Image (cartoon, rainbow, N blue to C red):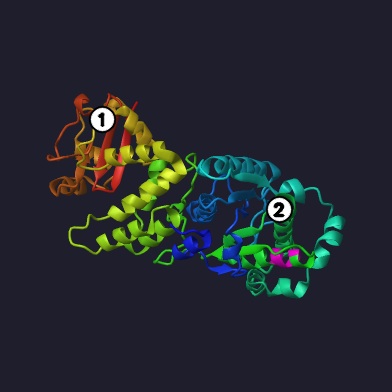
Amino acid sequence: MHKNVIDCLLERGFIDQMTSDDLREHVSSPRKVYVGFDPTADSLHLGNLIPVMGLAWFQKFGHTPIAIVGGGTGRIGDPSGKNLERPLLSDEKLEHNVRCLDRFFQSIFPSAGPRPIVLNNNEWLGRFTLIDFLRDVAKLFRVGPMLAKESVRARLQSEEGLSFTEFSYQVLQAYDFVHLHREFGVTIQMGASDQWGNITAGTEYNRKLGGETIYGVTFPLLTRSDGKKFGKSEEGAIWLSADKLSPYQFYQHLIRMPDADVIRMLKVLTFLDMDEIARIEKSMQEPGYEPNAAQKRLATEVTRFVHGEEGVQAALRVTEGLLPGSEAQLSADVLKEIAADMPYVQLGLSEVLGQKCADLLVKVGLVSSKSEAGRLVKNGGAYLNNQKVQDPAYLLSSEDLIDGSFLLLSAGKKNRLLISIL
């Protein structure tokens, strides 16, 4: 175990840049570190878990993690890493998102270690008048260095351009850092690599005010080996909120992580010891390696951190229940959980009983024709309630209904559909 959180994060590939090498000595004593999160949605997504893990690692080493929910900066919109200006949210939507993120941060950090602090920057930014802000804060910022920021230059060269509103964002974030330093004793800000310009704006602003040294740390923006953005999928964002994405769906996204990415994700998204991660990496090259074993460990660890042990057990229960050929006992309770996580239709009892299973596959759209259904059954790819269908002419009876209410049909091992009987 490292004695220093910076050495730990460096070994795990967390750190991209630091404002000073003195930071390693600085964190030899308990400090307060913050990350800002603008409430652009009512949930964070998987990509946002990187800074949350960074805060959690600082907490493990005895430092106080602070999450800033940008109720103020969220009204402006950060241009960093964006090709287009963010649409402005209504006050009602913004306040709803702030409340949701606040609840998330209150629950996500481990109970061991210093108690986390969650703040809304609208509490201090919202008190400014325009004249006061221009006179007391913006006066110390020079346009030349502001224009030189990478996020600004990229947008100025784009067809969209950059509004004055977005241009001012770095001033607001810089003020946040200094305010948190003065009022709460915060000395470290973390963020993704595209936040470097905003973070250094804060350290420079503090220097001009004659304050003691404060520090910035950035971590690399993670993209998958196929170039896709981490935290996104073909279906959209991989949300951390169970209200937007069930623990089962969250678990399944991680199970599908490519082999080329899984070790790196174990390093940055879990608390597993590096020696254990090295053993997992070595096992992936050995004969007899169970496919997806590393992904299963990743999915279990990350789901436990985000959704707790109950979320892990729910995900495993539904995963086992959905596996064609599985001997897992299907029940109405398990299938009700599944209903939120997969395609599902409602049919009347008369539309099911006495019908050929092959015909039902066509009716619900799992296959396009009766001939295709026949071939699927013949090739062993059709499943009813996880059991292989042997006969295309098999007639459905009341005994096939699970608790009298459900049928689970599968065309192959990935294309599944739940039928709820009215």
Dominant secondary structure of the residues highlighted in magenta in the image: helix
Q: Name above or below for residue 36 compared with residue 23.
A: above
- The residue that disc 2 covers is 180
The residue stretch that appears in magenta: 201-206
Mark 2 to mark 1 CA distance (whole Å): 63 Å
Q: Residue at x 49, y 63 (%)?
A: 7
The quadrant the C terminus occupies is top left
Q: Residue at x 24, y 56 (%)?
A: 291
For label 2, the SS is helix
Count of labels in the image: 2
For label 1, the SS is loop
Would you identify the image quadrant in which residue 257 lies?
bottom left
Other residues around mark 1 within 10 Å, as few (<14) / some (14–19) / many (≥20):
many
Tell which tag, 2 or 1, sits nearer the viewer: 2
User: Residue 129 lies in magenta, yes or no?
Assistant: no
**Taking 131 as reference, is 41 left or right?**
left
The answer to whether one can see residue 365 in this image is: no
Q: Are marks 2 and 1 in contact (CB under 8 Å)?
A: no
The amino acid beneath tag 1 is Val
**Mark sitting on residue 352:** 1
Q: Name above or below for residue 379 compared with residue 3.
A: above
The amino acid beneath tag 2 is Leu
Q: Name above or below for residue 2 compared with residue 355.
A: below
